[in-house]
Amino acid sequence: MSGEYEFIVVANRLPVDAAEDGEWRRSPGGLVTAVHPIVRQHKGAWVGWTGAPGEVPEPFGFDGMFLRPVGLSDDEVDRYYEGQSNATIWPLFHDAVEQPVHQREWREAYHTVNRRFADATAEFAAPDATVWVHDYQLMLVPAMLRERRPDLRIGYFLHIPFPPVELFMQLPGRADLLRGLLGADLVGFQRPLAAQNFLQLTRLLLGLDPKEDRVEVDGRTVTAGAFPISIDVAEIEAEAADTEVQAQARRLRQELGDRRVLLGVDRLDYTKGIEQRLAAYGELLAEGSLSNDDVVLVQVATPSRLRVTQYQQLRERVEREVGRINGEFGEVGKAPVHYLFQSRSRAELVAMYLAADVMVVSPLRDGMNLVAKEYVAARIDERGTLVLSEFTGAAAELGEAFLVNPHDVEDAKRGICAALDASPDQQATRMRAMRATVRAHTVDRWAREFLDALSATG
Ligand code: ADP
Ligand code: G6P
């Protein structure tokens, strides 16, 4: 059986969430931010979960796209989403900065749900359609889909890091995951090293014989490559040029007491190095290198994966540390940390980017980090500096940032101070160079390069 859609994106989440008031809202995270504009352009379909368990809405149109919801039961949310995806694969693929948990029932649910996504996609795809599968929640889908629909051209992109070989080897069911990915014609990663790790594993675990960027399997050729993701630069620049957004940025600075502003914007996730950032800032205040009269840290932390234990524990630790710093170094009406456990609109985020003197992006590991690129795109005034962890994909492109090792608190402190001390000229030189990079590599280009490479396969 086949359907009518020539271009289909398959991702764990639809680009919208069902909010409590019954409205649809754009869902969080870098994947949706990046892929949403592409599906819209292609007038394509998107197969994904609504973000809530239980009843599945009928397929519906939204913003020029056709959305096909896939349902998850309560148990599946526990086991497939919170368990195997976010307590096993997510930490393991991020250098195991939190201990991955392994449970057989989670793997079984992951298999069942991947099958459901593959079946839904098989029904909707026109003959010979292009299907683009995304991210770590759906690693088995390419092979499952190929089994049912060998006519399709299948691409897969991993938004998060692919781990070093020795970490991947720890995964129960590791060969199945690899075989799942090999169902695609093209497997894309953020970094070249990730593609090499993947190809090397096909030799080690499956006895295949990879050559350069490809490997033969079951008489087909699978290509692997790096396609570093980006953002919709024009959209962010337009927000940043909006006079209301600029006025909001000025108001924000006034409300913060005209102090110099350090800014963090992340999902509240242990990979983001929020604790390390707070530790560095707290030490700088304690030793008197920074003063609450002169500097303030605004930390926006989007609620994320709230039922997963490691995320609950992280939230407690972060909130305790924010309380400690404010208690120790604050005054009435003047807190050193403004902590917002909230989601914000795009316009508000851009106003914050414009209000910042220093953006601090300090993940312990991150596939790319779009926040860093958004900040650079927003700084049409060529002011402000970026402190950026070496362990992000973005660091490979944004060499003019103040690069730091967030595991080393002294290095993080050094980076923050150097970024605060940069003169307007130094800020402009660095920002101009970073802006040129970001403007030359937009999300459109990323998608075009991936899809061109996909159509050149097989
Ligand atoms: P991840 O995909 O791990 O969440 P990225 O930095 O790659 O990290 O992407 C995060 C995306 O989510 C960015 O587009 C950013 O603007 C958006 N975002 C992050 N925090 C918030 C927030 N508090 N409110 C709204 N959007 C947010
Ligand atoms: C990252 C992942 C995405 C995920 C997003 C938000 O960007 O790569 O796959 O959708 O985080 O996480 P969530 O668990 O809320 O979907």
Image (cartoon, rainbow, N blue to C red):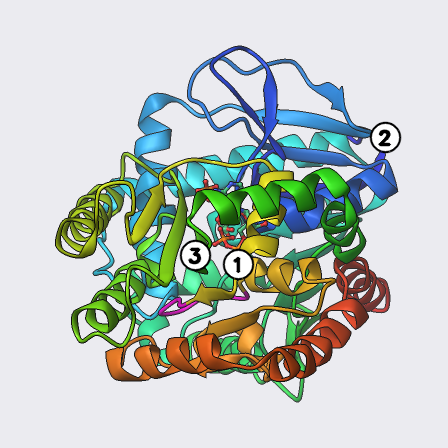
Mark 1 residue's CB less than 8 Å from ligand 1: no
Main SS class of the magenta portion in the image: loop
As helix, strand or loop, the secondary structure at mark 2 comes to loop
Quick one: 130 or 29, which is closer to the camera? 29
408 w.r.t. 350: above or below: below
Q: Is residue 152 visible?
A: no
User: Which residues, given as a range, are shown in magenta?
Assistant: 362-368
| Residue at the spot 86% in from the left edge and 42% down from the top edge | 42
Residue 76 forms part of the magenta stretch? no
- Which image quadrant is residue 405 in? bottom left
Spatial CA distance of label 1 from label 2 is 47 Å
Q: How many marks?
A: 3
Q: Earlier in the sequence, mark 3 or mark 1?
A: 3
Q: In front: mark 2 or mark 3?
A: 3
Mark 3 residue's CB less than 8 Å from ligand 1: no
Q: Quadrant of the C terminus?
A: bottom right
Question: Dot 2 corresponds to which residue?
Answer: 4
Q: Which mark is residue 264?
A: 3
Q: Earlier in the sequence, mark 1 or mark 2?
A: 2
- Which image quadrant is residue 1 in? top right
Quick one: 449 or 346, which is closer to the camera? 346
Q: In front: mark 1 or mark 2?
A: 1
Mark 2 residue's CB less than 8 Å from ligand 2: no
